[in-house]
Image (tube, helix red, strand yellow):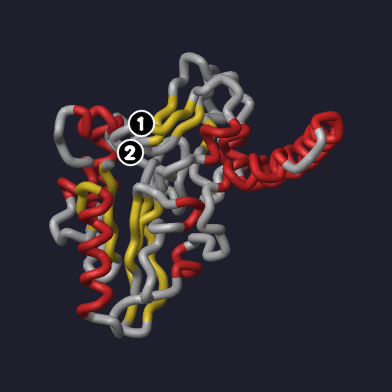
Amino acid sequence: MRALLFDNTKCVGCGSCMTACREKNGLPEVKEPDLSADQFTVLKTTAGKDGEVNYRRMCMHCEEPTCASVCPVGALHKTKNGPVVYNADICLGCRYCIQACPFGVPKYEWHSVAPRVRKCNFCADRLAKGQQNACAEACPMGATIAGEREELLKEARARLAAEPDKYVQKIYGEHDAGGTSVLMLSSVPFSQLGLPENLPADPLPLLTFRVLEKIPPVVATGGVVLAGLWWLTNRKAEVAKAEGKGAQR
């Protein structure tokens, strides 16, 4: 399975990854501080012990994606190569995927008359042709590299072992939320990069299934519906507030 490894100690903040992503996906040239329907990867900075640290945010392409598990029509699914891809033709526009993503990645085209859910597709078409992800190919410093997931994990472990004082001793995405196809190394805590550090090692969809298995069917049906409605209502309010700016564009 294909994956990416991003090492923020090697990133110089040139923005080549963003440019390559924009050109590959035909996105408009925007300069927004966060991911949006028109920006699938974003370059940010945070304070490090030796100065500014550059880092990327993008779809993590979970091994067992929660966004796909909540989609009622299968508009999102994980491919065998690694990408979590989206089919706008069958999307209902329910936006459950936006509410379910633990990384806050999918965005909605509020400004469009035919809105879609938008996010990085991991250059699925390029991978199918044996090519690299556009962002990895464009990175001049090797801060983002592409390869087989197991090989990238070996490389990441080797870097942690070789320079233990340089890195937080963790490969983000190795086990988080069941594992992701985007792996990260960092010189600062991952929480500084806007990444949740309290995610379980089990895939998030699996936790839901385990709970349902222990509940009698009659109780489960009513309970899950009520709990689901409560959770979705609250998440919709959070998402609407967070994306308020997008609705006004």
Residue pictured at 56% horizontal, 58% vertical: 200
How many marks are shown on the rendered structure?
Answer: 2
* Amino acid of disc 2: Gly
Q: Secondary structure at mark 2?
A: loop
Choose top left, top right, bottom left or bottom right for residue 134. top left
Name the quarter where the C terminus is drawn. top right
Q: Position of residue 22 (x, y in %)?
A: 29, 38
Q: Nearer the viewer, residue 144 or 242?
A: 144
Q: Position of residue 40 (x, y in %)?
A: 38, 41
Query: Relative to residue 208, is residue 230 drawn left or right?
Result: right
Residue pictured at 38% horizontal, 60% vertical: 44
**As drawn, 233 above or below 51:** above
Q: Which residue is mark 1?
A: 79
Q: Position of residue 7 (x, y in %)?
A: 27, 64
| Mark 2 and mark 1 residues within 8 Å of each other at the beta carbon | yes
Q: Nearer the viewer, residue 102 or 14?
A: 102
Q: Which residue is mark 2?
A: 82
Query: Relative to residue 147, is residue 170 drawn left or right?
Result: right
